Image (cartoon, helix red, strand yellow):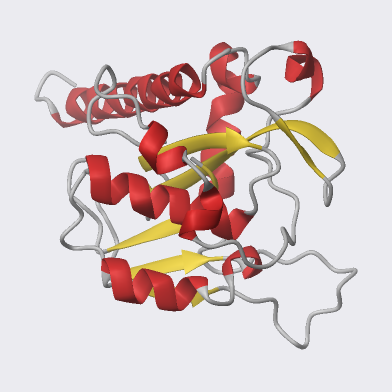
Amino acid sequence: MAGDAARPSPMANGLLLFPDLAQRRHLGAHPHGTARANTAALGTRGNAERRDPGQSNGQDQSKGGPRGFDAHKQVNGRKRHLLVDTQGFVLKVVVSAADVQDRDGARLLMHALRLYGPDLPRLALVWADAGYSGQLADDLRQQMGWTLEVVKRSDAQPRSVFAVQPHRWIVERTFGWWGGLRRLSKDYEYQVESSEALIYAGMSHLMLRRMTRAAARSSPAG
């Protein structure tokens, strides 16, 4: 994905696209059923290829609202598809049933961005993992003008050995931040729109805390 962002406010040159996400410009705005309607119309190719910590499960399985079963991960619930900048701050989120594949979730995200924004004129390069390989790269290039770069495991790395892949774990850290926010640690919401709105609220809370700390350090009295 690409350029470094020194502060939360500037837009990074590159972003990260990973599973589980939302779709509107303003939190209380128009429902985005159009972006969610019939993922087959956006293209359905491939299978989910990895476990996603953004997939909510556990005690929230008894909650109502749209849900699905992910046959690959053997869990029932929802997925949170995220587009984040190079610092891990959320730019767009779409929540879907768990039976929506990663590539189709990315297409939902792309469709939501086109319908509801925000505009990302500086975005040129997107990093993703192997779950987003295939035809999706051509779709992103044709419809959004983005270059998709799949971060792959090194051929020299044994599958039994863990190693942090470049860029790949930025979004995983974002999911980790949510563990400290009670309403995001589990998916308690009935409506996916409510779940998305709380993700934006939670990220706004985290960003404001960081900005306040940075201002306090830079002030003469600090």
Specify whether 116 is left or right of 74: left
Residue at 34% x, 75% y is 141
**Residue 170 appears in the figure:** no
x%, y% of residue 147? Answer: 36, 76
**Residue 122 appears in the figure:** yes
| Residue 79, quarter of picture | top right
Viewer-nearest residue: 174 or 114: 114
Specify whether 22 is left or right of 5: right
x%, y% of residue 11? Answer: 20, 52
Specify whether 67 is left or right of 220: right
x%, y% of residue 36? Answer: 46, 39
| Relative to 46, residue 54 above or below | above
Number of numbered discs: 0
**Farthest left residue?**
220
Specify whether 169 is left or right of 126: right
| Relative to 150, residue 183 above or below | above
| Relative to 73, residue 212 above or below | above
Residue at 70% x, 76% y is 153
**Farthest right residue?**
160
Residue at 15% x, 60% y is 121
| Relative to 152, residue 73 above or below | above
x%, y% of residue 45? Answer: 63, 67
Residue at 70% x, 12% y is 63
Q: Quadrant of the N terminus?
A: bottom left
Q: Quadrant of the C terminus?
A: top left
